[in-house]
Image (spheres, helix red, strand yellow):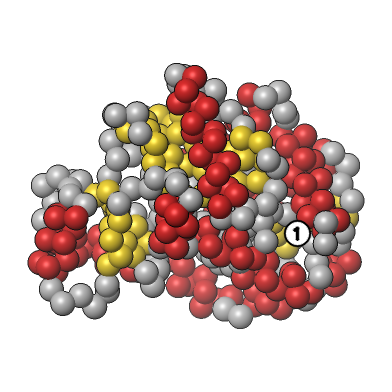
């Protein structure tokens, strides 16, 4: 097939996207596809593949300053990149993007208007899944438990009132999160002895990445994730970061996290988390594939953290690990995603 691979993009997960896309590119070519890479930030004046992939994922997330520089240099070029003749001629666009302008429904909306076929979920489910607060409401309505949360206002009356509200309704420790970021970018864990100053600093960090921010109950326990491909929940993975929280550095640095796949779970817990993953996937109207993240509390209660509609595809990523546990190679996994994506359009 003639495939366009969209890589990089303007989000805070740009480096992760480049690493994912590099792996995807090699696998697609191994399978015999004709693949051209386009990075939306360069608009109509695309760079060579070597220059696009010159910087892959490092151990730290891009700072707010670095993101501002990317947007300052490339602002408004993203749309022009989607009008390139190669995109219009392609049989399929493979979305190797993560985060904003990739995973939030905007690029899906544009492709729908242009009648261009692409991988993964449609515009609406992408948008809803990326919005953590909105998706928590939908998941809760569909019987999927999520940690308690409170949306925070940037222009609060007093920090002390916000602090007391969190203390009374959620408690400490808690997590301060941007509403529409991934890879734990902009996230802070406030410890049990957190102060008002700690809260202020964490809110400033989170609001640097998103217009909406919330505080979320911290769940002590085991971190699990379940890929959903088609209508099937794949083997459960347990994530065990070495000596810390599963943050950006632990996610993308080799050796800093161990993964158990399939996870060592009681059979009833395994069946429950798979059922909840499928229910979450369907509740948000996801298509083709997703990855659903959970915490298993010390009381063996499952809490859904979020649903990722374009999960990572780096060599340390979780969906390929789960697929491998079923005997599916990375190129075979991508072929399955391509087949499922094309089937979406056969139904129309």
On the image, the x and y values in percent for residue 253 come to 46, 38
Q: Secondary structure at mark 1?
A: loop
On the image, the x and y values in percent for residue 162 come to 17, 66
Q: Is residue 319 visible?
A: no
On the image, the x and y values in percent for residue 273 come to 49, 33
Local packing at callout 1 (Cα closer than 10 Å; few below 14, some 14-19, many 20+) is many
- In the shown orientation, is residue 105 left or right of residue 248? right
The residue indicated by pointer 1 is 118
Q: Quadrant of the C terminus?
A: bottom right
Q: Nearer the viewer, residue 36 or 343?
A: 343
Residue 114 position (above or below residue 328): below
Q: Nearer the viewer, residue 295 or 193?
A: 295
- In the shown orientation, is residue 80 left or right of residue 133? right
Q: Say which quarter of the image contains residue 100.
A: bottom right
Q: Nearer the viewer, residue 145 or 249?
A: 145
Residue 224 position (above or below residue 75): above
- In the shown orientation, is residue 272 left or right of residue 219? right
**Which residue is at 66% across, 56% downward?**
121
Q: Say which quarter of the image contains residue 110.
A: bottom right
């Amino acid at each position: 097939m003639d495939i366009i691979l969209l890589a990089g993009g303007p989000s805070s997960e740009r480096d992760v996207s480049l690493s994912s896309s590099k792996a995807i590119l090699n696998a697609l070519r191994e399978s015999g596809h004709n693949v051209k890479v386009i990075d939306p930030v360069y608009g109509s004046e695309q760079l060579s593949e070597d220059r696009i992939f010159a910087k892959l994922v490092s151990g730290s997330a891009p700072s707010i300053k670095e993101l501002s520089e990317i947007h300052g240099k490339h602002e408004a070029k993203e749309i022009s990149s989607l009008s390139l003749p190669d995109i219009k001629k392609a049989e399929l666009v493979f979305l190797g993007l993560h985060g904003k302008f990739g995973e939030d429904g905007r690029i899906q909306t544009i492709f729908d208007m242009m009648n261009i076929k692409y991988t993964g979920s449609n515009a609406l489910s992408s948008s809803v899944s990326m919005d953590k607060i909105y998706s928590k409401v939908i998941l809760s309505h569909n019987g999927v438990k999520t940690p308690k949360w409170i949306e925070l206002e940037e222009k609060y009356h007093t920090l002390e009132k916000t602090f007391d509200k969190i203390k009374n309704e959620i408690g400490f420790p808690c997590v301060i999160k941007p509403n529409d970021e991934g890879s734990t970018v902009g996230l802070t864990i406030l410890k049990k002895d957190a102060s008002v100053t700690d809260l202020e600093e964490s809110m400033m960090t989170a609001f640097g990445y998103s217009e909406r921010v919330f505080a979320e109950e911290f769940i002590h326990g085991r971190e699990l994730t379940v890929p959903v491909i088609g209508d099937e929940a794949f083997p459960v993975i347990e994530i065990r970061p070495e000596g810390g929280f599963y943050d950006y550095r632990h996610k993308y640095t080799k050796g800093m996290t161990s993964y158990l796949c399939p996870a060592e779970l009681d059979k009833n817990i395994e069946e429950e988390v798979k059922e909840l993953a499928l229910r979450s996937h369907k509740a948000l109207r996801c298509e083709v594939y997703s990855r659903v993240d959970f915490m298993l509390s010390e009381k063996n209660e499952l809490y859904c953290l979020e649903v990722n509609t374009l999960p990572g595809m780096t060599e340390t990523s979780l969906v390929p690990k789960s697929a491998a546990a079923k005997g599916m190679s990375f190129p075979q996994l991508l072929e399955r995603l391509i087949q499922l994506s094309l089937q979406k359009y056969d139904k129309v």
